[in-house]
């Protein structure tokens, strides 16, 4: 798509706002609709749009597959680690109130933020990896 000048310019203007909206959904998710899953998909959509406009090679140069594998694992570990931390503090798995025993409301807020962050990181990394897997396939014929 090197000859699509308008598409490339509009993409360069639009992608930062898509990423910003993804961050907004991520950090506003515990107060209203949205959260980690939605934010991960929105951020992945920005990278996929970049890959569609500028090519998969350009997208892979920004978000390398090895980095995505690490981020997917980090997201799962953050999610599971939040639950295990609650268990180590005497609560049940993902009992966020146990994270801060002297202020369970703060513990709930902290736990939700950490879990949603883990989900957002994992979902975004996996969605981009799925795009790479499909975009890298050779066309028959």
Image: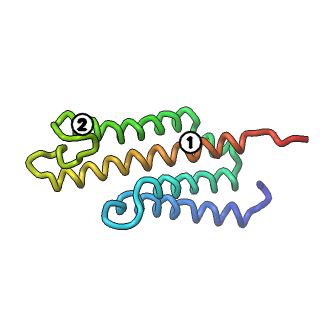
Q: Are marks 2 and 1 in contact (CB under 8 Å)?
A: no
Residue at 69%, 60% in the rendered image: 8
Find disc 2 in the rendering and name its residue. 85
Q: Position of residue 70 (x, y in %)?
A: 48, 34
Q: Nearer the viewer, mark 2 or mark 1?
A: 2
Residue that protrudes farthest toward the right in the picture? 141
Whether residue 62 sits left or right of residue 27 in the image: it is right
Residue at 58%, 65% in the rendered image: 14
Q: Position of residue 99 (x, y in %)?
A: 19, 44
Residue at 30%, 52% in the rendered image: 112
Find disc 1 in the rendering and name its residue. 63
SS at circle 2 = helix
> Disc number at residue 71?
none
Work out whether residue 7 or residue 112 is closer to the camera in this orientation and state it.
Answer: 112
Work out whether residue 97 or residue 121 is closer to the camera in this orientation and state it.
Answer: 97
Compared with 75, 103 (above or below) is: below
Work out whether residue 6 or residue 127 is closer to the camera in this orientation and state it.
Answer: 127
Q: Quadrant of residue 3?
A: bottom right
Q: Position of residue 45 (x, y in %)?
A: 58, 56
Whether residue 70 sits left or right of residue 54 in the image: it is left
Work out whether residue 79 or residue 47 is closer to the camera in this orientation and state it.
Answer: 79
Q: Is the C terminus in the top left, top right, bottom left or bottom right quadrant?
A: top right
Residue at 83%, 42% in the rendered image: 139
Q: Position of residue 69 (x, y in %)?
A: 52, 34
Q: Is the N terminus in the top left, top right, bottom left or bottom right quadrant?
A: bottom right
Mark 1 surroundings within 10 Å by alpha-carbon count, few (fewer than 14), some (14 through 19), many (20 or more): some
In three-dimensional space, the C-alpha distance between marks 2 and 1, rounded to whole angstroms, equals: 30 Å
Please tell me which of labels 2 and 1 falls first in the chain.
1
SS at circle 1 = loop
């Amino acid at each position: 798509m090197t000859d699509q000048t308008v598409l490339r310019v509009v993409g360069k203007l639009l992608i930062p706002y898509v990423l910003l909206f993804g961050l907004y959904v991520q950090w506003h998710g515990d107060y209203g609709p949205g959260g980690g899953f939605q934010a991960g998909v929105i951020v992945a959509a920005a990278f996929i749009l970049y890959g569609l406009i500028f090519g998969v090679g350009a997208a892979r140069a920004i978000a390398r597959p090895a980095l995505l594998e690490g981020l997917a694992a980090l997201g799962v570990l953050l999610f599971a680690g939040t639950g295990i931390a609650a268990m180590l503090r005497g609560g049940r798995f993902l009992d966020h109130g146990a994270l801060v025993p002297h202020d369970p409301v703060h513990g709930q807020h902290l736990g939700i933020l950490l879990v949603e962050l883990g989900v957002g990181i994992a979902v975004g990394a996996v969605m981009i990896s799925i795009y790479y897997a499909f975009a890298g396939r050779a066309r028959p014929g």
